[in-house]
Image (tube, rainbow, N blue to C red):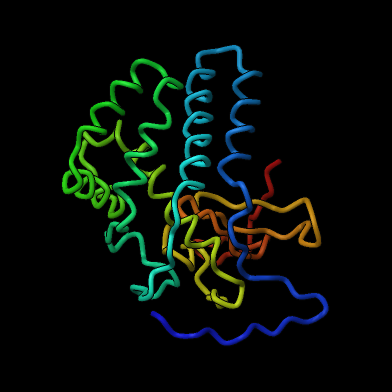
Amino acid sequence: MNTTAEPIKKGLFHTPFWLAPEKNTFENRSVRFQELAAAEPGEWRLYLELLAAVCAAQHTVALRHTFLLPEKHSGATVLPEAAAGEVPAAFYDVFQDLLNEVRGNITHTAAAETQRLAALDKPEAEVLARRVLTQAGEEADRSAEIWVQAALQIVWTAWAAQLAEDDVPPVEERVHCPCCGTEAVGSVVLIQSDLSGFRYMHCPLCNSRWNALRAKCTSCGDSGGIRIQQ
């Protein structure tokens, strides 16, 4: 899909349907994981420290690359649909850069896995990425998925960050991301800015968010029995 979206009419109390990824998404996420790790007395601290290192590397790598928006969009989404399995041209370079960036900042076990992945040639890495995108991963892929997903996140997030609100028209279906078609990882009720109190679904791939009614299940559309957990 490569059509020009109709301008969205914005009234005085306009609530945007779609929000682009926040600036410094990966850097802010790394800081938060570091805070959680510092407060964690158990073994989970090592995992949180690993996530902090991955996010810090994502931030650094993202700044080193230029990501041009695809000229042609596939499927019904604004960006190339992840489930279609088309691996971005920039993936391999970003993947290798990410693996090099985390070197020395992760555990021996994680370092052994990144060293194995760094030895993959481009066709091998892209086949692996295609399995991850299409959720056709094998058991042997499990330990590699965090690194593949991290690299794919960098690309799709950079693409989404270049979009404007008018590029993403509202849709009825709220479970999947209108940008890349990925199923939402969850939803949040915002507590800052003029959008405080509004609920937004969050994409785990391109890190964009889209509006959904608070008192309605996005999967089945039912508005009964809804409870807000805090």
Residue 57 in the image: above or below residue 128: above
Identify which residue, 21 or 132, lies in the foreground.
Answer: 21
Seen in the image, is 26 located left or right of residue 176? right
Residue 115 in the image: above or below residue 91: above
In the rendered view of the protein, which quadrant contains the N terminus? bottom left
Seen in the image, is 214 located left or right of residue 168? right
Seen in the image, is 51 located left or right of residue 28? left
Quadrant position of residue 72: bottom left
- Number of numbered discs present? 0
Residue 219 in the image: above or below residue 169: above
Residue 22 location (% of width, % of height): 63, 53
Quadrant position of residue 2: bottom left
Quadrant position of residue 230: top right
Identify which residue, 50 or 94, lies in the foreground.
Answer: 94
Residue at (36% x, 33% y) in the render:
99
Identify which residue, 190 or 34, lies in the foreground.
Answer: 34
Residue at (65% x, 51% y) in the render:
188
Residue at (81% x, 62% y) in the render:
194
Residue 221 location (% of width, % of height): 55, 67
Residue 229 in the image: above or below residue 39: below
Residue 97 location (% of width, % of height): 37, 39
Residue at (57% x, 65% y) in the render:
222
